[in-house]
Amino acid sequence: MVESINTQVDMKIDATAFTGLTDYGEILIGDKGFEFYNSRDVRKFIQIPWEEVDQVIVSVMLKGKWIPRYAIKTKRNGTFTFASKRPKDVLRAIRVYVDPANMVSSLSFADVIKRAAKSMFKKKEKKKKK
């Protein structure tokens, strides 16, 4: 059995982790870090101490009425994406331990398309200058 890094648990909720394949389990938010435990396989778990969290990236839809998923970007180990039943409550619990300035919303679909178009035109302009 895996030992929890938290001494006090603030929130426990059913969730999904998007790690290659979809893993179903529970999220635990506590005083020492963010934890995800798979409900079927005890060897599949994610433990992220609060000191390791760089950013929390939130996917916002319908002007904030719906949050389908959120991701935790760490300083060393990459980005982990999760979805849960009450994402607003989860993000409020995370906000206690993570600086609200490090909680950002992800780009919308239109923003991604705009950036792609701008980068295509910049590449064409560079080729013309040469």
Image (tube, rainbow, N blue to C red):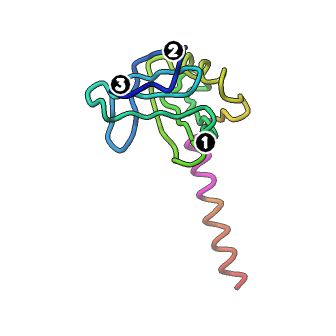
Picture layout, residue 84 above or below residue 78:
above
Q: Amino acid at mark 1?
A: Leu
**Distance CA(mark 1)–CA(mark 3):** 27 Å
Q: Quadrant of residue 93?
A: top right
Q: Residues within 10 Å of mark 1 (few under 14, many from 20)?
A: few
Q: Quadrant of residue 104?
A: top right
The residue positioned 63% from the left and 38% from the top of the image is 55
Q: Residues within 10 Å of mark 2 (few under 14, many from 20)?
A: some
Q: Earlier in the sequence, mark 1 or mark 3?
A: 3
Picture layout, residue 4 above or below residue 72:
above
Q: Nearer the viewer, mark 1 or mark 3?
A: 3
The residue positioned 59% from the left and 57% from the top of the image is 116
Residue toward you, 43 or 83: 43
In the rendered image, the quadrant that contains the C terminus is bottom right
Residue toward you, 104 or 80: 80
The residue labelled by disc 3 is 25
Extreme residue toward the bottom, this view: 130
Element under disc 1: loop
Q: Which residues are magenta?
A: 105-116
Left or right position of 37 against 49: left
The residue positioned 26% from the left and 27% from the top of the image is 40
**Pointers 1 and 3 in contact (CB under 8 A)?**
no
Q: Residues within 10 Å of mark 3 (few under 14, many from 20)?
A: many
Element under disc 3: strand
Question: Majority secondary structure of the magenta segment?
Answer: helix
Residue 117 image position (x, y, % from top left): 61, 59
87 is within the stretch colored magenta: no
The residue labelled by disc 2 is 11
The residue labelled by disc 1 is 107
